[in-house]
Amino acid sequence: MTESVRKLLPILAIGALALVAPYVLPDYRIQLALLWIMILFALTWDIMGGQMGYNSFGNILFFGLGMYVCAVVQRDAGLSYYPGLFAGLAAAAVLPVVVAAVLGSGLLGLRGHYFAIGTLGLGIAAGEIASGWDYIGAGSGMVTPLYPGEIGARQTFFYFASFVLATVTFLALRRIYSGRFGLAVNAIRDDEDKAEAMGLHTTRYKTVAWSVSAFFLGMAGGLVGNLNGFIDPRDVAFAGATYGVFMVLMAILGGKGTLWGPVIGATIFHITQEVFWTYLLGWQRVALGLLIVVIVVFFPQGILGWAKARYPERFGIRVEAAAEDADGR
Amino acid sequence: MSDQTMLVVDNVSKRFGGVVANADISIQVKPGEIVGLIGPNGSGKTTLFNSIVGFHPIDSGSIQFLGEDISRLRVPQIARRGMLRTFQQTRVYDGISCMNNMRISVPHRAARMRDMFAHVPPEIDERAEELLEFVGLFSKRHLLAGDLSFGQQKLLEFAMALMNGPKMLLLDEPTAGINPTLINGLIDRLRRANADMGITLLVIEHNMRVVMNLAQRLYCLAHGEMLAEGAPEQIQNDERVIAAYLGAH
């Protein structure tokens, strides 16, 4: 089996599972769709937080923005359902990118903790603005257009849409991490002053990294708005206290700065969270809080980070000098 | 080159609050030269380096590189013009392998937007391996840079600087922390970088044996002021320099 086939196998296996899942577990289609969205959350947070070392607490802004932009286009463009949805998703991808680029030019000058604090207010401010603006329904929220198919078809449609979007996100990130972009953001994480001293266009890389997050998060927002059928400004769109925190936790749980870490972290986190809701009703938040403490205390490097430190060779990290040494090179 | 001078530092001053770190310093470096910068601890050598590469704004004076005024440019802009510095406290990218450290140290002068998403071409890998072999780190190329010893990181930092293909390299204590038996090898490599790769060198160095061997010309700073300049033998016998080092100042 060649190297590339071996690397593709887990992706194909997950793909096969993903295709049959909505038919095997039809009652869980919304939860399964949200699982893909959670994976996307963790993956996009990790671009900045893991690979580049810039902890952002404001990424939820792009998600909520995409959700509203998509819904407004669907409502006002006068198109029929599917063209309207696609136009909405396209707008939901573009506008957050513009916002990320503009905000980035100011905020990305901040480093370390200052950047984290600077982004903290973004989601909260956006939620306040959205709940006071009549054009988008203010505090009573927005209803997305009715899905034209039969009852139940909506869930299947948005399940597959979420699956495709999360997969595209994963493959796109895998592609850019393997090239110069990945090296550059890792260099910025390890020593930004050094990267500047070597002439790297650090501002350009940082802005693009945030814009890539915004691009996928915006589209995810557009999908979740339609999956839900209803947009609440504070609890769904700019849900900083839930989704906004979850995306950080999931990436850390799985292992930040790795490609598969966020995927693993999001899967474990989402399933655990659902189990808590089902079996510990009334205590689910307490259990979740305890889980967070356990993650931070026992897995500060995440599951993959822990595995990497323990079995470095399996991850392609060499700890011994190469054998060529012997023949005098 | 219009006036046969690569770097002109003209009456540059820099103060931090009440401390005058550099007072009216002027130095000149011609293309292809190896120039040494010496002086006791706290004499303002690293401050001068920081001023030249744009790490902090200067209070007065001007700095020209290749005939262009760079006094107001920032670090990455100056680096892309072909003037790099290495750090006294060695700095490499700890979390990635030596090869990846080299791969991202390519010159960024002509980098376009679409290069950001490009794969690393094979000729970059070949050049990186060549240079790692040049500094003697070839067998360690797949190790994480953070797992190397201090001396090895210093060599890696030097190789990264060469990878960038600079016209001029400012080295801040290249031999500090390096095993004495390896220092001769390093001097030899610095000379070869200068002669074979055509890189002009400006070197801060405390090891007198090294700097007297390596440099063609020396500047000596003390208390933020230019004390003396000249050939190594001249400086070695300069009363003021000896007094400054022995603390009779």
Image: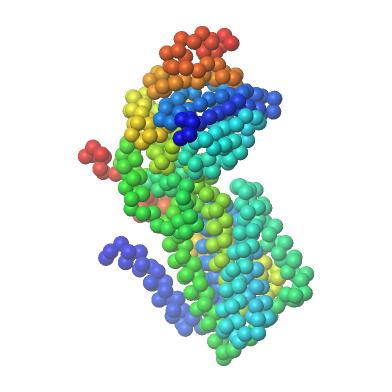
Which of the 4 quarters of the picture holds residue A129? bottom right
Residue pictured at 57% horizontal, 58% vertical = A210
Q: Nearer the viewer, residue A229 or B82?
A: B82
Question: Vertically, is A214 above or below B77?
Answer: below
Q: Nearer the viewer, residue A326 or B72?
A: B72
Q: Is residue A296 visible?
A: no
Which of the 4 quarters of the picture holds residue A175? bottom left
Identify the image quadrant of the N terminus of chain A: bottom left
Horizontal relation, residue B164 to residue A285: left or right: left
Q: Is residue A41 visible?
A: yes
Q: Residue furthest front?
A: B2
Horizontal relation, residue A174 to residue A44: left or right: left
Q: Residue furthest bottom?
A: A150
Residue pictured at 44% horizontal, 46% vertical = B107
Residue pictured at 70% horizontal, 57% vertical = A121
Identify the image quadrant of the C terminus of chain A: top left
Residue B123 in percent (x, y) is at 33, 50
Residue pictured at 59% horizontal, 20% vertical = B225
